[in-house]
């Protein structure tokens, strides 16, 4: 063995060559050998770098990093950056969602989650909530039960005019300790937990502000907050805020947001917002109409995120006007909801077949769509509605019709009284063709009906207008006009009448497109309809409140725990209720009342399914669809997690996870 070592050692140099000596190695090589040497050396170092990089990549992963800037665009301008008032304005609610934390939050995967609160106990009509220890406002002051009690009492005081007040009537609030607060209800209600998503305001800031100055206080803009961000700067032009700059709140109890500069730019119109997006001035924004989806995502800088709401749109029949269940059923069967979603929403929505929307809440009692044109036509035929020469249906009436004129009417009125008026005017037009030319029995008091009433009043001026001192027609059917109509049209021979329905809705592109889709689909079974639109305030004041519609295209929305009571209980058919169908059913009422006191989750689901069954068997409305909420963000913005949310501002619930910067960390 020693001889072998000696032999090998004989081939090795006594010592390694110095750098100057090693240079002679290259010189002794010929050209081909030198080229090969350099190539092998290059390969060695490239391989070394590649191996090192591969080792680095395989043993590390990309992770969010702090820093970066994001700009959200919103249509509209904030009025009050204050949770007491934000429910009345979408922009206010969005901004408040970034600045204030709720007591609890809700997501559809995990249910209720604690935020400022760490525990809730329920005992019948009493709830006790405990706050997390160490919570602080952005100015460093502690968040306590005193702040919660103050917030609730401000909401309850009518002098402050908070839109949240109806939710808190009948609730007594009391501080138990610095961190505990109790809520005593007039009546036990498992639904109360919905209200505990309340966002709290700081008492030490607001306690000395009078109700008269609450809306005008500078604190509504320069807020002391509890959420992930706080206001760092703002741009105001005239009466409107044009931009806000937000920075992370150093006292936020949750995870520090990755994005260091969160900016919000406010625009007066959707067109201005989209233009700013195309120019690269904003990084994210939301749109209402899904038809804009393809247009916006054609710009490869933006990625679309779809959020679902517990909200649905339906065509609500006024069951006191459209009182034939067979007709309501036929009209329901004639609607292909998938086609409506494809045509109107570009496929970005969900078919809804139930007032409970079980799919959103992951209940297992879903309902199949009931689209069936053949059955719809059979029902219409058997009910006496036949196709006429124009391809639309007419109602066959063989006996004389007794008309009733016991109700004052005006533009916007709807229902059977209007139909009787139109029947009379058409009958009188047989001898006076200028009275109501091309008149139809639509049940809606529109401009054509008003003109015909004017013509009628002026024709009988001495009997109708002169006694009241009017020189020309008023277009309103009041006492004198009703008396003359009764005299001339007490009994008239009725013939086939046009079968025309009036769809009333809000004057918004999406709602009008839905109404147009319904209208065109009904035409396939010979049903003619007209569309009447109003702006939001006029619709609520002039149409919904007095229930002056034949059918109305509108939406309903639920909270975390669905409560159909406001929309379907008999007590809600009044002008102050939300029962748009004027649906009344004793069995449904009993179930709705049971639901409000039931505490067991499994039993609540059983009751909800029974409510669904009792409502659907009466066809009080055509349940159509839920519409996805679409949020667009630049492809440089990562960490956005689309999900089911309760309202648009909840898209910011996980804003702390959004990021633009990255780094690599060891796995």
Image (spheres, rainbow, N blue to C red):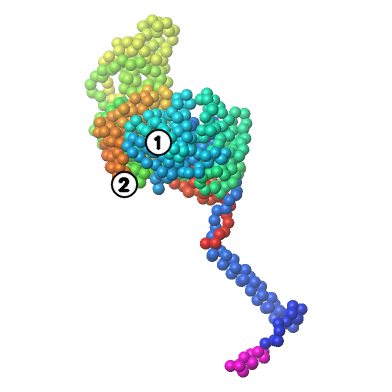
As drawn, 536 above or below 40: above
Helix, strand or loop at label 1? It is strand
Give residue 661's position: percent from left, percent from top: 58, 52
Q: Position of residue 42 (x, y in %)?
A: 66, 73
Q: For this rendering, which residue is in front, 566 or 345?
A: 566
Is residue 429 visible in the rendered image? The answer is: no
Query: How busy is the neighbourhood of tag 2: few (under 14 within 10 Å), some, or many (20 plus)?
Result: few
SS class of the residue under badge 2?
A: loop
- Write down the quadrant of residue 599 in the picture: top left
- Whole-number angstrom distance, CA of label 1 to CA of label 2: 35 Å
Residue 473 seen from this side: yes
Sequence-wise, which precedes: disc 1 or disc 2? 1
Q: Quadrant of residue 158?
A: top left
Q: Which residue is mark 2?
A: 364
Q: Nearer the viewer, residue 188 or 342?
A: 188
In reply to whether residue 406 is colored magenta, the answer given is no
Q: Measuring 39% from the left and 31% from the top, which residue is drawn there? A: 172
Residue 111 % position (x, y): 39, 45
In-front residue for pair 343/39? 39
Main structural element of the magenta stretch: helix, strand or loop? helix
Q: Which marked residue is nearer to the observer: mark 1 or mark 2?
A: 1
Q: Residue at x 41, y 15 (%)?
A: 475
Residue at image location 61% in from the left, 71% down from the top: 47
Task: Point out the stretch of residues depicted in magenta.
Answer: 1-11
Percent x, y of residue 167: 40, 31
The label number, if any, that marks residue 182 in the structure image = 1
């Amino acid at each position: 063995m020693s001889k072998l070592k000696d032999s090998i050692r004989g081939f090795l140099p006594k010592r390694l060559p110095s750098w100057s000596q090693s240079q002679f190695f290259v010189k002794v090589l010929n050209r081909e050998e030198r080229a090969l040497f350099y190539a092998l050396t290059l390969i060695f170092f490239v391989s070394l770098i590649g191996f090192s990089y591969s080792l680095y990549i395989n043993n590390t992963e990309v992770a969010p990093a702090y820093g970066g800037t994001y700009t959200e665009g919103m249509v509209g301008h904030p009025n009050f950056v204050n949770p007491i008032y934000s429910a009345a304005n979408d922009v206010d609610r969005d901004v408040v969602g970034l600045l204030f934390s709720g007591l609890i939050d809700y997501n559809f995967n995990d249910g209720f989650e604690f935020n400022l609160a760490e525990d809730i106990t329920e005992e019948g009509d009493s709830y006790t909530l405990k706050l997390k220890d160490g919570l602080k406002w952005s100015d460093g002051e502690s968040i306590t039960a005193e702040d919660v009690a103050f917030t609730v009492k401000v909401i309850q005081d009518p002098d402050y005019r908070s839109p949240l007040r109806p939710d808190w009537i009948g609730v007594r609030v009391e501080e138990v300790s610095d961190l505990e607060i109790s809520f005593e209800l007039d009546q036990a209600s498992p639904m109360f937990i919905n209200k505990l998503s309340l966002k709290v305001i700081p008492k030490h800031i607001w306690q000395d502000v009078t109700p008269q100055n609450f809306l005008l206080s500078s604190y509504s803009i320069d807020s002391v907050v509890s959420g992930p961000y706080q206001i760092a700067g703002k741009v105001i032009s005239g009466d409107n805020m044009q931009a806000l700059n937000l920075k992370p709140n150093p006292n936020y109890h949750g995870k520090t947001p990755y994005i260091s500069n969160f900016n919000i730019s406010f625009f007066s119109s959707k067109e201005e917002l989209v233009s700013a997006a195309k120019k690269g001035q904003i990084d994210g924004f939301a749109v209402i109409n899904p038809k804009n989806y393809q247009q916006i995502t054609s710009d490869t800088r933006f990625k679309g995120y779809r959020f679902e709401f517990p909200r649905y749109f339906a065509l609500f029949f006024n069951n006191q006007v459209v009182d034939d269940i067979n007709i309501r059923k036929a009209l329901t069967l004639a609607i292909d909801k998938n086609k409506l979603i494809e045509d109107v929403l570009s496929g970005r929505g969900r078919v809804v077949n139930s007032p409970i929307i079980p799919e959103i809440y992951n209940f297992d009692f879903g309902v199949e769509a009931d689209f069936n044109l053949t059955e719809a036509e059979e029902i219409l035929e058997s009910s006496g509605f036949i196709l006429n020469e124009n391809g639309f249906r007419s109602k066959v009436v063989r006996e004389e019709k007794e008309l009733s004129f016991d109700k004052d009417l005006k533009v916007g009125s709807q229902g059977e009284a209007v139909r009787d008026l139109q029947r009379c005017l058409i009958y009188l037009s047989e001898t006076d063709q200028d009275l109501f030319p091309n008149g139809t029995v639509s049940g809606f008091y529109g401009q054509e009906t008003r003109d015909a009433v004017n013509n009628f009043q002026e024709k009988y001026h001495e009997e109708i207008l002169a006694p009241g001192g009017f020189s020309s027609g008023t277009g309103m059917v009041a006492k004198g006009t009703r008396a003359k109509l009764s005299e001339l049209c007490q009994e008239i021979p009725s013939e086939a009448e046009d079968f025309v329905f009036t769809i009333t809705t809000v004057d918004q592109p999406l709602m009008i497109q839905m109404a147009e889709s319904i209208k065109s689909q009904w035409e396939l079974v010979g049903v003619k309809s007209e569309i009447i639109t109003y702006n939001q305030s006029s619709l609520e004041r002039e149409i919904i409140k007095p229930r002056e519609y034949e059918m109305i295209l509108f939406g309903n929305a639920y909270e975390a725990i669905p409560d159909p009571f406001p929309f379907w209980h008999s007590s809600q058919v009044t002008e102050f209720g939300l029962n748009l169908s004027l649906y009344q059913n004793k069995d449904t009422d009993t179930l709705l009342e049971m639901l409000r006191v039931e505490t067991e989750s499994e039993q609540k689901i059983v009751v909800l399914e029974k409510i669904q069954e009792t409502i659907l068997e009466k066809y009080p409305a055509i349940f159509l669809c839920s519409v996805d909420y679409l949020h667009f963000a630049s492809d440089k913005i990562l960490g956005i997690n689309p999900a089911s949310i309760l309202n648009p501002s909840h898209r910011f619930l996980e804003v702390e996870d959004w990021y633009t910067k990255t780094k690599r960390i060891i796995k």
